[in-house]
Image (cartoon, rainbow, N blue to C red):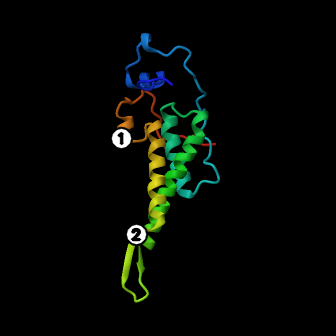
């Protein structure tokens, strides 16, 4: 196992403007860029499908949407939609569950299980999001590329 910082991919170095020929990784794995954004997976919820289109369009516009990453993007979209859907349920049903004694007095309260589901889903989404520069801190080191696709001029989806 290697120690130290993770190696930064050359594409990220190019976007940051920090690429130096003496620090380019030899035989760096290069993966295929998506030439047209695929439709969202049918199994995703409506919220997940909307997130898919938003994320894919953004990454595609920066030439950072790769075939090999599509499953991770699926996972991100599912996790963020699960978080949002569970939060909506929590707002409707409540976050606290009250347990009472047989005489009706309050015994104790606890968070409903959906609270853990919402929190875990958000944690998973954030972990994946940082890999794609989808959080403010993870994209702070990436400069805007010269290629920028206008979101409403073309249909980039299959």
Q: Which residue is mark 2?
A: 110
Q: Residue at x 53, y 41 (%)?
A: 56
Q: Residue at x 48, y 53 (%)?
A: 121
Left or right of 124 on screen, residue 108: left
The dot on residue 70 is none
Residue 142 point in image, percent of width and height: 38, 30
Q: Nearer the viewer, residue 8 or 110?
A: 110
- Is 41 rendered above or below residue 137? below
For marks 2 and 1 on the same chain, the one whose residue lies earlier in the sequence = 2
Q: Residues within 10 Å of mark 2 (few under 14, many from 20)?
A: few
Residue 31 point in image, percent of width and height: 59, 26
Residue farthest bottom in this picture: 103
The image quarter containing residue 92 is: bottom left
Please tell me whether mark 2 sits on a helix, a strand or a loop.
strand
Q: Residue at x 45, y 52 (%)?
A: 122
- Is 87 rendered above or below residue 34? below
- Is 66 rendered above or below residue 44? above
Residue 68 point in image, percent of width and height: 60, 34
Q: Residue at x 38, y 21 (%)?
A: 17
Task: Please name which of the two marks, 2 or 1, marks the residue nearer to the observer.
Answer: 2
Quarter of the picture containing the C terminus is top right
Q: Which residue is mark 1?
A: 136
């Amino acid at each position: 196992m290697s120690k130290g910082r993770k190696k930064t991919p050359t594409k990220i170095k190019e976007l940051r403007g920090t690429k130096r020929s003496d620090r380019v990784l030899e035989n760096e794995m290069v993966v295929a860029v998506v030439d047209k954004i695929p439709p969202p997976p049918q199994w995703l919820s409506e919220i997940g499908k909307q997130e898919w289109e938003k994320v894919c369009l953004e990454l595609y516009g920066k030439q950072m949407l790769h075939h090999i990453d599509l499953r991770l993007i699926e996972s991100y979209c599912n996790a963020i939609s699960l978080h949002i859907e569970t939060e909506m349920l929590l707002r409707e049903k409540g976050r606290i569950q009250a347990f009472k004694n047989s005489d009706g007095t309050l015994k104790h309260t606890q968070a409903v299980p959906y609270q853990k589901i919402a929190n875990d889903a958000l944690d998973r989404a954030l972990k994946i999001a940082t890999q794609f520069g989808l959080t403010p801190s993870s994209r702070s080191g990436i400069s805007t590329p010269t290629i920028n696709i206008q979101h409403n001029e073309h249909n980039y989806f299959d």
